[in-house]
Amino acid sequence: MTATTTQPAARAGLAARARPRLRAPLRNPWRRPVFLEAFTWLYLIWSLVPVALAVLFSFNRGKSQSVWQGFSWHWYIHDQVNSVWWNPNLHAAVVQTLRLSAYTTLIAVPLGVAFALGINRWRGRTASTFNFLMIVSFVIPELIFGVAMFFMFTALLKGIGLGTLAETLALVTWNVSWPAIIVQARLATIGRQYEEAAADLGASSWQIVRRVMVPLLTPAIFASAVLVFSSVIDDFVLVDLLNSNAGNTPMSVYIYSQQHGGNGGPALNALGTIMLAMSLVLVLIGYAGYRWMTRGERGDGRAALTTIAGA
Amino acid sequence: MAAQARDGTRARRPREPHRLFWAAVAAPGILWLCVLFIVPFYVILAIAGGYVNQVFGYPVAVWDPLRWSPANFSAAWHDVAGTGAFVLPILGRTAWYVAAASALSLLIAYPAAYFVARFAGRRKGFFLVLLIAPFWVSYMMRMLAWIGLLSTDGYLNKALAFLHLDGLLTALPLLHLGKPPFDWLGGLSVTVILGLVYGYIPYLILVLYAGLDRIDPALIEAGRDLGLGRLRTFLRVTLPLSRQPIVTGMLITVLPMLGDYFTNELLSGTTGTTMIGNVIDEQLNTPGLQGQGAIFSLLLLLVLVPPMIWYVASTNRASREASQ
């Protein structure tokens, strides 16, 4: 039914396009999509303005979250009790987040890169089984994995118990799939010709990895390191289940537990702003570094942006 | 043929890395996954099949599957169907919240991603930065932002009063807002659903953008050249081509939403908006109930296994196509 009714219109369209001189559009089919653009702007305002306001209120002189009382560094430095600088718990939370991010990145990236290299070139049933497992670890809901880890360290490995070590081990397992997936994607685009050439020229297995493949993979390794570091900053569920005291509570958990316990306030906004600043620095380093490493290749800034965001 | 040729060349190159070499390279990662990913799930099983220490209330794991006891399972079953059953309404609510939140996310994310991928032109980089920005803002910070705005004397209520929209919102039947100033954080479903949308939409929008950006504009132009209107081109060309990113993006948002417990703790904190994640989290923190927490985690996992397998299979297919 619909096909027959649209046919005359379709024919007319074809006829108009068949004669180049009449191609000048009567009604411009490529006009700017005003509604879509307005909708996109509304979305962006909705997604970004609340965060901007929260950052702003971390600089509020008073305790209010809704009345602006003047700019100050009160909640960062000046308040001798509740500011991030003076409150030992807030302080410890910043340190713990950075520590966990650093440990996790240092372990997960080499582990994931080696895994990706080995699995990708090994091939065979065993390799694909473990690759499957790796992707499962990527999509499994964090709460379920967190529960498994919680029991792991409270029922099986009681010697480890909860705390920084448990948090790190869980975060590494949770994040090792970033380098594993990104490096494999990069390996697929590189192809095998470089390593075959190196083998022809007499390189040993180890030299092929060390002198040929790792340099070729550097942008992917770098991008995955940025992603791992930032997703540990953002991580909440695992560290919430696996922390044991104020000394090993990172920022996200601290914000949650204080806010949840009714102790919200600008100091938490200040902590959140510090998290934001960390991520911002990280994304700038990541973007600049990735652009620099891939400077000889096709692809533009947009590709770099989506890569370091993990898409 | 090709495989044979490759084997032939390989025979002349004794120095090309041996399979065992690659196995050795992958070994640390494999070992790590076995010890810290597979074993933990066996531990959940052992806890679930174990029993609870009657004096101290801590769970005792039973490692031998033949000696697993049904104690925790029957306790969990009691929660679902016994006299003190409370889980069924929570399961229903979880399904409804997640369905509403993911549908809403798609309705919001798709047009925005579509605009940036197709029509942003030279401003694409600019829009992309703004689109990706929330991805780099931590979840807790984004929730904190809304808690400030949603408080009774917060900017949202002020804005609504200023625009004289509060009367209209009071009259809407499904929201149950009560009278202005609205107590947004007092246990409203709409707050929790919108909170979930706000929390997980950056991941969805990124996947959608990447998928829509990959569509060859020539295909869309072909649709237009063959006489389809704007809407029809979209429905017949763009939408079918974006099926894969839509499904992947939905999975990427739905899976974590189902395990979410912090969003509604922060934005409502009342029992009227409890989800299954809250049940598990609470049982994990309550001596004596940890075994049941293990059971519910396993049940949630069981429900999520098919979509997870589907996701893994489709990623594998996509990467195989990319490498060919």
Image (cartoon, coloured by chain):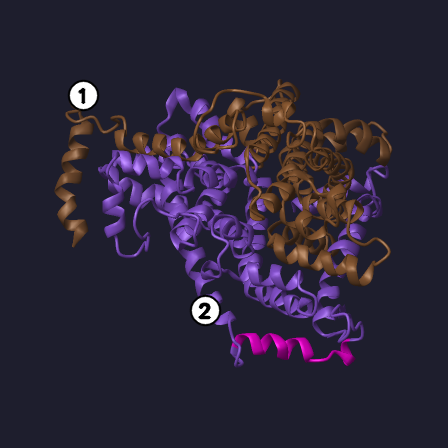
Chain colours: A brown, B purple
Q: Residue at x 49, y 61 (%)?
A: B271
Give the x, y percent position of residue A4.
Answer: 15, 50
Query: What span is colored magenta in the figure?
Result: B65-80
**Residue that label 1 marks:** A24
| Front residue of this view, candidates B7 and A47 | A47
Secondary structure type for disc 2: helix
Q: CA distance from mark 1 to mark 2?
A: 61 Å
Residue A283 seen in render: no
- Image position of A205 (left or right of B91): right
Secondary structure type for disc 1: loop
Residue B270 seen in render: yes
Give the x, y percent position of residue B74.
Answer: 63, 79
| Front residue of this view, candidates A68 and A249 | A68
Give the total of numbered labels. Answer: 2
Give the x, y percent position of residue B70.
Answer: 68, 80
B69 within the magenta span: yes
Q: Main secondary structure of the magenta part?
A: helix
Comparing labels 1 and 2, the label whose residue is closer to the camera: 2
**Residue that label 2 marks:** B89
Q: Which mark is residue A248?
A: none
Identify the image quadrant of the C terminus of chain A: top right
Identify the image quadrant of the N terminus of chain A: bottom left
Are there few (<14), some (14-19), or many (20+) residues within 10 Å of tag 2? some
